[in-house]
Amino acid sequence: MTDEAIVDVEKLVRDNLDGNGSLDLENRKLYDDGVIRLSNLEALSQATKLILGDNEISDKGVAALCNSPYLSQLKTLNLKSNKVTTEGAKLISQSANWSNLDQLVLKFNEIGEEGAMHLAKSEVLSNITTLDLFRNHIGSEGAKAIKSSPNLKKLSRVRLD
């Protein structure tokens, strides 16, 4: 990526981060490289809602978000319609960045049953009240793990396969 692309990510944040802390970058063709650059922007510390749907983000991009020093205040993380797999779900389940999350949207990804198990076992995600895993092929065992998880007791809205 060129320096111009870096400026573009910074400009996207400047232009789309609203006064309520919502940053909607859905369908902006960010890919992993753009998300890696995004995760290093200090301006993200102002975001409480991050919408990154339809950006072809894989587990590599998820890892960058999980390791970002600027995202621990997020209340909503939306990664719908990307390329998140079991590994990405595992990374999310273990990252201290998500301890304040209220909503996690992963619909239309590829986390599978094992990914659902990682989320169900996560102590980091204990504050989540909304979890959307629609069309992730989590199967009956994955659904059962989510529904019966002692760590996800605050869930009030759940959408599974």
Image (cartoon, grey):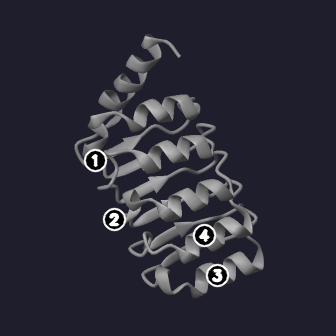
Calculate the distance from the C-alpha at mark 1 to the C-alpha at mark 2.
14 Å
**SS of the residue under disc 4:** helix
Q: Residues within 10 Å of mark 2 (few under 14, many from 20)?
A: some
Q: Quadrant of residue 154?
A: bottom left
Calculate the distance from the C-alpha at mark 2 to the C-alpha at mark 4.
18 Å
Eye-nearest disc, 4 or 1: 4
Q: Residues within 10 Å of mark 4 (few under 14, many from 20)?
A: many
Which residue is label 4 attached to?
118
Calculate the distance from the C-alpha at mark 3 to the C-alpha at mark 2.
21 Å
Which residue is label 1 attached to?
21
- Asked if residue 132 lies left or right of residue 151, the reply is right
- Measuring from the top left, give residue 66's x and y in whole percent: 45, 51
Q: Earlier in the sequence, mark 2 or mark 4?
A: 2
Q: Amino acid at mark 2?
A: Asn
Which residue is label 3 attached to?
145
Calculate the distance from the C-alpha at mark 1 to the C-alpha at mark 3.
32 Å
In the displayed structure, 127 sits above or below 1; it is: below
Q: Amino acid at mark 1?
A: Gly
- Measuring from the top left, give residue 92's x and y in whole percent: 51, 59
Eye-nearest disc, 2 or 4: 4
Tags 3 and 4 touching, CB below 8 Å = no
Calculate the distance from the C-alpha at mark 3 to the C-alpha at mark 4.
9 Å
Q: Amino acid at mark 3?
A: Ala
